[in-house]
Image: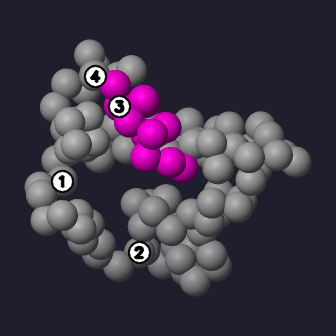
Amino acid sequence: NIIVRFMADPDDGFAPDEWQYGGRRGPAPPVVLARRDKLPFSQQDWDLLSEYMSEWLDELMEAEEERAGVSERMLTLSALREYVDNHRDSHPAALLAVRFP
């Protein structure tokens, strides 16, 4: 669920209980994502950001004791910028504002 992913706590990768949906809790309400700078948020933007978040969560789960270090390293603009640059061939139009500030 998209809102659960966006509400993930950087310390452990899990969203707080009040943001958990599915099963007996029912479906999540409709969600609208908007960029603070009011630029469009494209499907390519979401695809690349989702992949980055998945990599962060994978590394977080593997780290066990060093989760804070993983988040400190990966949840920075420079780390995201490097990831976007490394994936520009597969997502050429994604997060252009990050690639070209």
Q: Secondary structure at mark 1?
A: loop
Residue 82 seen in render: yes
Residue at the location (38% across, 36% down)?
81
- Measure the alpha-carbon separation of dots 1 and 2: 21 Å
- Tell me what residue is drawn at x 18 percent, y 53 percent: 41
**Residue extending farthest top:** 89
- Which residue position holds label 4? 88
* Of marks 1 and 2, the one in the foreground: 1
Q: Position of residue 45 (x, y in %)?
A: 25, 43
| Left or right side of 75 for 32 | left
> What residue is disc 1 on?
41
Bin the neighbour count of mark 3 within 10 Å (Cα to Cα): few under 14, some 14-19, many 20 and up.
Answer: many
Name the residue that disc number 2 marks. 28
Q: Which residues are magenta?
A: 75-85
* Residue type (three-letter) at the residue carrying disc 3: Val
Q: In the image, what residue type sits under mark 4?
A: Arg
Of callouts 3 and 1, the N-terminal one: 1
Up/down of 91 relative to 80, above or below? above
Q: Residue at x 71, y 59 (%)?
A: 12
Cα distance between the residues tagged 3 and 1: 15 Å
Q: CA distance from mark 4 to mark 2?
A: 32 Å
Position of residue 14 in the picture relative to residue 82 (left or right)? right
